[in-house]
Image: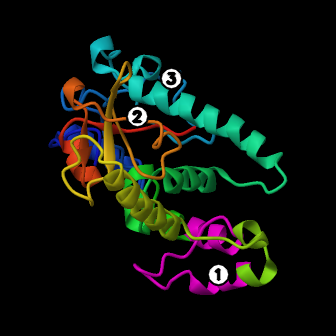
Amino acid sequence: MTAWRERSQSPEEVGRAGRRGPGKKRARADSNAHPVSAMRKNSPLRSAKGRTAVAAAAPPVKADLLWLNDYLPYRMAVVAARMLREAGRVYKRRRDPLNTPQWRVLGILANHEPLTASEISKISMLDKVAISRTLVEMVRRGFAWAFVKYSSAYVAEEAEARTRGVGIWQAPTTTAWDHRAGRWAEARDTESGNGASGTPSRDCVIKGNITSGGRIYHMPWSPWYEKVRIEAAKGERWFCNENEAVAAGWRPVRVN
């Protein structure tokens, strides 16, 4: 795109252009054609190698400019980048250092059910390809299991980690989903056997507790599950699944 509008030349201008010889024809800036059509001779935007940059004929109005120091998304991005950089230095001092994407994925997996790479990508705001590479490395180092219910993509890496005895394979281990299934079955038998108040059925064992921090639900594998007692008179209740609890206005308990 040119920075000026083409206009017809007068006979005198045509003659002057011809006397300059071929290749010497110059276009004249039309100050009314575009706001960046003219440039002062001593403009700092002139290139050191002689190339001419196009500058504004008049300074723009402040309201038309984007001042980065006043732009909140930019400032938040800078703060986030600095925090991740400092956190990365801490991660690298550990015996088994993890990079930033690996720590982020590990935190997500610790707070959610087994997830696919696409689901982790949506939560972490990381590219799916980067997530896949991160998962391969984490399974290979023994920081995660290969959840074969969804895919067999990481089975080879898990077998390698098991053979080397690294990470979770340093001792006999139970997968997270097997552990949770066992705790769910145990809670189903225990709570129904105790005649828990307001329990709708043996399969509804999620405890919806009300505290000063709000409405919180506890899964059977929560550290505080056994200590929580449901009081229906206070509005506390039982849930059959997490979607039901979230839809009713409860949130999951935070485990540090």
Q: Position of residue 182 (x, y in %)?
A: 47, 66
- Locate the C terminus and report the quarter of the image it occupies: top right
Residue of label 3: 43
Q: CA distance from mark 1 to mark 3?
A: 60 Å
Q: Amino acid at mark 2?
A: Val
Residue 198 falls in which quadrant of the image? top left
Q: CA distance from mark 2 to mark 1?
A: 56 Å
The crowd level at tag 1 (other Cα within 10 Å; few <14, some 14-19, many 20+) is: many
Q: Residue at x 53, y 40 (%)?
A: 255
Q: Quick check: 150 above or below 239?
A: below
Q: Secondary structure at mark 2?
A: loop
Q: Quick check: 152 above or below 124?
A: below
Q: Position of residue 197 (x, y in %)?
A: 25, 40
The answer to the question of whether label 2 and label 1 lie on touching residues, with beta carbons closer than 8 A, is: no
In the image, which disc is placed on residue 54?
2
Q: Which residues are magenta?
A: 133-161
Sequence-wise, which precedes: disc 2 or disc 3? 3
The crowd level at tag 2 (other Cα within 10 Å; few <14, some 14-19, many 20+) is: some
Q: Residue at x 26, y 27 (%)?
A: 35
Return the residue nearer the eye: 29 or 88.
88
Q: Amino acid at mark 3?
A: Ser
Mark whose residue sits in front, 2 or 1? 1
In the image, which disc is placed on residue 157?
1
Return the residue nearer the eye: 51 or 98.
98
